[in-house]
Image: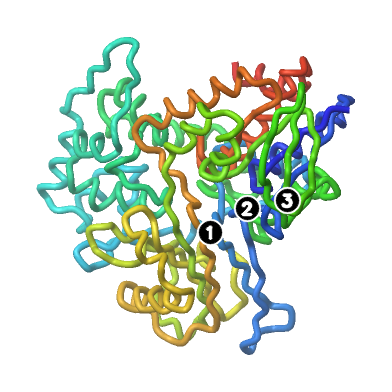
Amino acid sequence: MKNVIIIGGGAAGLGAAYKVKRAAEEGHDVSFTLVEKDPRLGGKIASQRVADEWDGAEGAEFIIDGGPDCFLTSKPAVHRIAKMAGIEDDTLPTDDSRKKTLILSRGKLFEMPDGVMMFAPTKFVPFATTGLFSWPGKIRMGMDLFVPKKQVPEGTLNDETLESFIVRRMGRECLDRLAEPLVGGVHASDPKEMSLAATFPNLLEMEQKHGSMLKGFIAMRKMVEDMKKKYPPQPGAKPRTFFTSFTGGMQELTDAMSSAAGVENMKTGAAVQAIERVGAGYKVTLTDGTVLDGDAVIVATESWAAEPLMRPFDEAIADSLADIPFSTSATVSLGFKEDEVGIDMDAFGVLCPAGEKRALLAATFSSTKWPGRAPEGKVLLRGFVGGPQNQAIMDKSDAELIEIVKAEMRSILGVKGTALFARVYRWNLGMPQYTMGHLGRVEAIESRCSEIPGLALAGGSYRGVGIPNCIESGERAVSKVLNDWDIELAEDAVEEKRVY
């Protein structure tokens, strides 16, 4: 039996483990051993339940997501895994009856205009009447219709920074008041450094196809509306919203994946010290002295953690891994009594542009966005701090971060009352930065790995930071090592047929 050693127990590692388990169920003679340095599985997907001890009903509780609280509904990987793992009925759409996003601008809160798709307006009246943008800014955004598309020489990679693209097409005000806070709040990235080809390649394709962002997004909105008319929701079915979560928090997904794959083959609380090639196989030494023998190794950690493991093993891979930068961030969740919080909770949250010079990147009204996240009569808020433009704040203690977030929520949103509790989740070097040249670095890593039988890397450091991307990354890594052994899975054949 061939054994695959998987290093890392986050979404990518668990995605890999579950795929190996499915390969074994197909009848292939394969197994896995997963190693995770932390005492728990799930990586950045971490959910916590806090009992309501403040006049709440018996059994009432808050459900907190310390890391990502959702996934993009349009990406199929999580839905596919949820169905296989038996938790499809627990998927949770957002409460779009209360959908509203606030943006801080010039010290005031503005509602994001209806019809904005990513970084472009697609409805005239909401855009014309919003106070978020000045009239010169609105006119400049409208000039996108007349800005010629970039000429890309044949055979060259079409890429530029997000800042360059948005300013070129829509103007500086669109970047500062819309694009940057959206990217900062979701991707924790700096638009001045972001590679568009690695993060939002659809924008580059849209420009080349439509010659304009506005034309492209208007066409996209029409297509979405046509699809909704063609495929109306079935009576009693859950609504299909832009984001989806799980009733028990996102950790419900990784818990289900680990159970389905087999926790008996997973070892937690021990880090990997070294990887060695021994003949046609591998030897992996752990910090507790354990030595694992395997026929393949999948390194499903952040690239900065993979780099020292690969350095003595393969310098070329390690050099490319070392060139991928990361930023550190944290989330701070706060519970309040609803009759004391003192703000209108009919919104999903607020985004704070870097130009506002606030410590808060963004805040989510978790109990509004996700039904069931707080007991009746209580609310749950979550603040984000850190990111590439404010790494200094991460030197603060947990107690200091809590007080900073409380003060920011009071100042920006008008939050009142005393917080019932606070929970801090720190993600040290947790967000990869897809800077210019990122795709070239990834291609160099993948090219070198393709030459080494039984070796693959996976995770959010390479081709997408979202949960579906990470799961698919782990699955691709399994396909790679199985192909090295001339093993083809039935599900891969089905997927290849579906894609092509």
Q: Position of residue 251 (x, y in %)?
A: 67, 56
Determine whether label 1 and label 3 are within 8 Å by CB: no
Residue type for callout 3: Asp
Which residue is identified by label 1?
95
Mark nearer the N terminus (1 vs 2): 2
Question: Residue at the spot x=50%, y=52% of the render?
Answer: 430
Image depth: mark 3 or mark 2 in front: 2
Q: CA distance from mark 1 to mark 3?
A: 17 Å
Which residue is identified by label 3?
89
Quadrant into which the C terminus falls: top right
Which residue is identified by label 2?
43
For numbered disc 2, what is the local secondary structure?
loop
Q: Is residue 45 shown to the viewer in this render?
A: yes
Q: Nearer the viewer, residue 495 or 276?
A: 276
Q: CA distance from mark 3 to mark 2?
A: 24 Å
When the figure is inspected, residue 382 is found, relative to residue 70, above or below; the finding is: below
Q: Is residue 90 shown to the viewer in this render?
A: no
Determine whether, in the image, residue 446 is placed left or right of residue 439: right
For numbered disc 1, what is the local secondary structure?
loop
Determine whether label 1 and label 2 are within 8 Å by CB: no
Residue type for callout 1: Asp
